[in-house]
Image (cartoon, grey):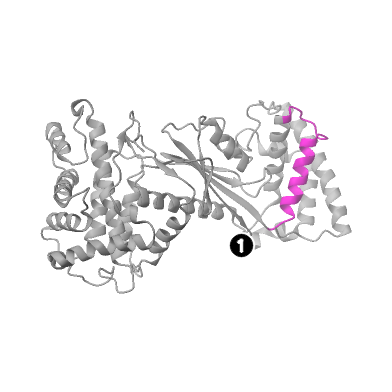
Amino acid sequence: MSEQPASSERRSSFNELGELARSFIAGAFEALREEHVIPTPVFHPYIAVGRDYFGDTIRAVPAYRDLEGKLDETYPERFGEPLKRRHAEFASSYIFSFLEACIARCGRARTFAADSAAVQDSIDELLAVLGTTTNEIVCCRHVSHVTTTSGDAQIADVVVVPEADEWVRLLRRICAEIPGAATSWNRDDPQPYDPPHALLITREMSEDPEPYEVANRLSRRLERFLFLIRLLTGGTVQSAYEISGATTLVAPMKPQMSTFRKGAPLVRRTVRLTGDEGPAFAALSDLIDAAEVKREGMVATSFDVALIKFNRSYSGDSPYEHLVDLATALEAALIGAEKETEGLTLRLRSRVAALLATDDDPARALFRDVGLLYGLRSRLVHGGQIKEKDLRKDLLRISTVPAENFDHRFSVALGHAVDRMRDLVRRAILVRLCLAAGPNPVWPFDGETPVDAILSDDAQRASWRARWHERLDELAVGYAGAPSRSAVDYLSQEDH
């Protein structure tokens, strides 16, 4: 932590600042009592300016201007001439953060007194935060269908906290990581239900003057983490909500809550992490980063479209939208920017069958399933009418859709169909990454490779199929190339 030197003159200034802060709190508490803002409920001592009280009420407190002026004088490197600086900070934002920290601590202690230990703790925190150029920002994301084999698991720079038996345990952990987190959900505790749940936590100590950008960076880190989980395991993990903020109540940013368009998947494939997956995640992440996809001058590339559509299939859209997205992703991954459009469906079916076939997922089943799913996608996209009885018939023909109780579980069968398409896209993405990887890639992202001609030769087809599996084996993630284990419906127990 980078702190400023504390000379005797500066310590004297800190003491004066502390007394001004306490005097301000005394006046602010008196004003807020008159407006019945405090005392707060014990179960929710978190308030926010503009939502629970008027900012003008606080600015009218006599000691407010004195405290603001003293902060400007003591910390000119932070607050001096803010309108002339790229990363402006204002003393007023810290004053309101300090006030709300005092109220939160006093509310928990059940005493609203300016001379209380709770107020002193907040004064100490204010001086500590302003006395350093470093902030610790944390991002917590609540996800479904993820757990661990034993307690918290650390994978690279992400901590995975399983829910165990109580959903409230995750909320308590969020509040332990981000003390003011409860402000962000405003008395309406987020309680998604799609077990098993887990909390993903990542953090960064940074001197970045834009804490909100740090939070965005951490969010992208968790998104990459989930993408790797999905590619490696085929898990049906979805994001429910995310909270980011500082590790102090007095902070340069307010805790932020984001919710995701989470659906209620009718089939489930839970991911169970051991904590030993760090090397596998790193290896796959490096493979993705090393992909030589030409993006200069491009609005979008076919491979990027495949990744985006694949990830979007985990959102709360309808299963029909997922089928359209996933069919587009499969085409983008295995057909790409090729100009030849004749016989596209047949070429796609043939490539999937040639490259993804295994003993557990034979080429014939792959060829048939892609035809059925891609045909459904075409009718949806082009506005064709689909009769329910015809759709039921097609779904039942898909190799991974269980036949039992089909008549009473149409939506579950549709969920299995989406899951099948998603797993084909998952493996297709891995195929493209591995076959385009150097040195001497056999199917680079650039140029025109006669893919269909090559795959028409038995020896070449076997060679390509072996090559991408061998590449995964070299990265110690060979299991990712196999078909995902069977998903179960939301009422059934998984077979682990």
Report the quarter where the N terminus lies.
bottom right
Judging by the rendered image, the residue that carries numbered circle 1 is 86
What residue sits 30% from the left and 57% below the top? 429
Magenta part of the chain: 109-133
Q: Nearer the viewer, residue 19 or 434?
A: 434
Is residue 174 shown in magenta?
A: no
Above or below, 151 relative to 353: above
Q: Position of residue 210 (x, y in %)?
A: 59, 56
Q: Bin the neighbour count of mark 1 within 10 Å (Cα to Cα): few under 14, some 14-19, many 20 and up.
A: few
Main SS, magenta residues = helix
Q: Position of residue 445 (x, y in %)?
A: 28, 68
Q: Position of residue 334 (x, y in %)?
A: 23, 59
Q: Position of 47 compared to 322: left or right?
A: right
What residue sits 73% from the left and 53% below the top? 130
Q: Nearer the viewer, residue 475 or 426?
A: 475
Report the quarter where the C terminus lies.
top left
What residue sits 86% from the left and 49% below the top? 15
Q: Position of 69 compared to 213: left or right?
A: right
Q: Is residue 302 visible?
A: no
Q: In which image quadrant can residue 427 be found? A: bottom left
Helix, strand or loop at disc 1?
loop
What residue sits 28% from the left and 62% below the top? 468
Q: Position of 177 compared to 236: left or right?
A: right
Q: Residue furthest bottom?
A: 440
Q: Position of residue 325 (x, y in %)?
A: 27, 48
